Image: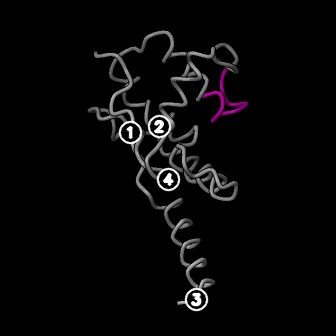
């Protein structure tokens, strides 16, 4: 196999991964209730990341999806609530209601979000097994 063949194969693998890799969510009885619209958004954001060469971190839709089951199970503390609303605002754009829209985070909250989005492999599960306080 030539270098070009290897490169094409790697690109095809990355494209298939962006579309077919599993969506990782917080382990909860609610994990199977993830809304369908966010699954499509995750794939779109993965494709954008692939083009930009940013596959090493989870995208905002993936982080929102990861948090979703935990938010349904029990309330979050104020920092994680702000992060969840921020992610919702990023993912939903103008569809996010103004009264809960969050367009910025504190430095501390931004650090929590960065940790949540870090991955060991493209689109893999977040390094944090449970970043949320116990229920």
Which residue lies under the disc numbered 4? 122
Picture residue at 35% right of the left edge, 34% below the top: 26
Q: Secondary structure at mark 2?
A: helix
Q: Earlier in the sequence, mark 4 or mark 2?
A: 2
Residue 59, magenta (yes or no): no
Q: Earlier in the sequence, mark 1 or mark 4?
A: 1
Q: Secondary structure at mark 3?
A: loop
Q: Position of residue 6 (x, y in %)?
A: 55, 80
Q: Earlier in the sequence, mark 3 or mark 2?
A: 3
Q: Are marks 4 and 2 in contact (CB under 8 Å)?
A: no
Q: Earlier in the sequence, mark 1 or mark 2?
A: 1
Q: Nearer the viewer, mark 4 or mark 3?
A: 3
Left or right relative to 17: residue 93: right
Q: Is residue 45 above or below residue 128?
A: below
Which residue lies under the disc numbered 1? 25
Whole-angstrom CA distance, mark 1 to mark 2, is 6 Å
Q: Are marks 1 and 2 in contact (CB under 8 Å)?
A: yes
Which residue lies under the disc numbered 3? 2
Indicate the quadrant containing the C terminus: top left, top right, bottom left or bottom right: top left
Left or right relative to 110: residue 16: left
Whole-angstrom CA distance, mark 4 to mark 3, is 25 Å
Whole-angstrom CA distance, mark 3 to mark 2, is 39 Å
Span colored in magenta: 88-97
Magenta span main SS: helix
Whole-angstrom CA distance, mark 1 to mark 3, is 39 Å
Q: Nearer the viewer, mark 3 or mark 2?
A: 3
């Amino acid at each position: 196999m030539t270098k070009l063949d290897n490169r094409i194969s790697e690109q095809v693998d990355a494209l298939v991964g962006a579309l077919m890799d599993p969506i990782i969510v917080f382990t909860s009885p609610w994990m199977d209730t993830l809304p369908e619209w966010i699954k499509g958004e995750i794939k779109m954001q993965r494709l954008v990341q692939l083009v930009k060469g940013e596959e090493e971190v989870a995208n905002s839709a993936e982080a929102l999806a990861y948090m979703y089951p935990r938010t349904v199970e029990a309330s979050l503390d104020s920092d994680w609530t702000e992060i969840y609303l921020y992610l919702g605002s990023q993912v939903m754009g103008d569809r996010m209601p103004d009264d809960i829209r969050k367009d910025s985070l504190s430095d501390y909250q931004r650090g929590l979000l960065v940790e949540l989005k870090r991955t060991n492999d493209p689109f893999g599960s977040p390094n944090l097994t449970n970043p949320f306080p116990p229920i």
